[in-house]
């Protein structure tokens, strides 16, 4: 009975774009959500937001994060709907070429994080709209997340794509809100080693992101060869 329910929901999400077999179930949705969360990684975002967190009131910070997340969500959804057509009809290039490039970018950034550690990507500015844009890009929007948005759009109809992307951004926002709210408690728990633990976490998650990047690269090359 549970499998039938999963299949029904999956069928509603895939609609006319369904490319998976009839045995595909809802867990594939969770796989996309997890992969997306690994790429945008709220813990890494929390680390990079430290210059802003230290200077901005909590409520205002949440508003700025929400703005940046909304901008990213809209862009992800647009690419999930028109991504293939954009590359095929406008740019006249195969999407697999972008997937290969996206995989290379993710792998390079992951390697840089592992070797160099944390570098500042966001700076505090009085114009909070500018901070929201910095959160949207480069922290959330990149070659990897755009590629994954297009892949999601290839497998699900717009309603399914919107659902997956919305869940991802909601989880990311809630995780950032909780991490920021309990930042002082976290720092007290780790005491003077807080920065070192954050640096280690950044490098650890970079390994997972790098694996996703290499997988995108290999898959893109295989599809181009076929």
Image (spheres, rainbow, N blue to C red):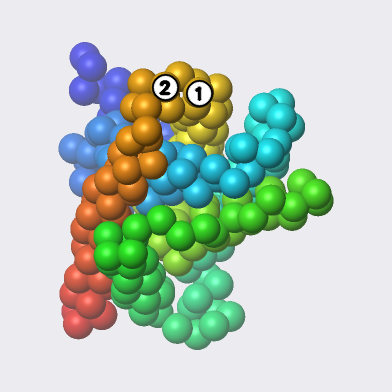
Place residue 194 in its image quadrant: top left
Q: Position of residue 8 (x, y in %)?
A: 34, 28
Q: Nearer the viewer, residue 197 or 84?
A: 197
At horizontal 70% and vertical 36% (from top left) the residue drawn is 56
Q: Which residue is mark 2?
A: 188
Query: Looking at this view, is 86 or 113 the one in front?
Result: 113
Question: Does dot 2 land on a helix, a strand or a loop?
Answer: helix
User: Hey, which residue is sitting farthest right in the picture?
Assistant: 127
What is the quadrant of the N terminus in the image? top left
Residue at the bottom extreme, as displayed: 92
Residue 14, given in percent of the width and then of the height, sits at 39, 43
**Does residue 15 appear in this view?**
no
Work out whether 126 lies above or below 104. Answer: above
Q: Is residue 108 left or right of residue 68?
A: left
**Percent x, y of residue 216:** 27, 65
Are discs 2 and 1 less than 8 Å apart at CB? yes
């Amino acid at each position: 009975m549970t499998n039938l329910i999963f299949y029904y929901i999956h069928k509603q999400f895939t609609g006319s774009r369904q490319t998976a077999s009839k045995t595909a179930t809802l867990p594939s949705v969770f796989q996309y959500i997890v992969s997306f969360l690994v790429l945008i990684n709220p813990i890494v975002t929390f680390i990079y937001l430290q210059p802003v967190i230290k200077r901005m009131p909590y409520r205002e910070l949440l508003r700025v994060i929400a703005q940046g997340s909304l901008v990213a969500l809209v862009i992800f959804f647009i690419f999930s709907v028109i991504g293939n057509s954009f590359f095929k009809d406008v740019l006249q290039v195969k999407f697999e070429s972008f997937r290969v490039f996206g995989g290379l970018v993710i792998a390079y950034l992951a390697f840089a994080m592992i070797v160099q550690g944390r570098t500042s990507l966001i700076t505090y500015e009085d114009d909070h709209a500018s901070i929201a844009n910095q959160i949207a890009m480069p922290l959330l929007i990149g070659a990897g997340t755009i590629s994954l948005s297009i892949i999601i759009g290839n497998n699900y109809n717009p309603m399914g794509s919107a659902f997956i992307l919305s869940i991802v951004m909601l989880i990311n926002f809630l995780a950032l809100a909780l991490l920021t709210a309990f930042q002082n408690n976290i720092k007290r728990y780790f005491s003077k080693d807080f920065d070192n633990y954050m640096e280690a976490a950044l490098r650890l998650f970079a390994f997972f992101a790098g694996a996703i990047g290499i997988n995108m690269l290999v898959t893109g090359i295989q599809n181009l060869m076929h």
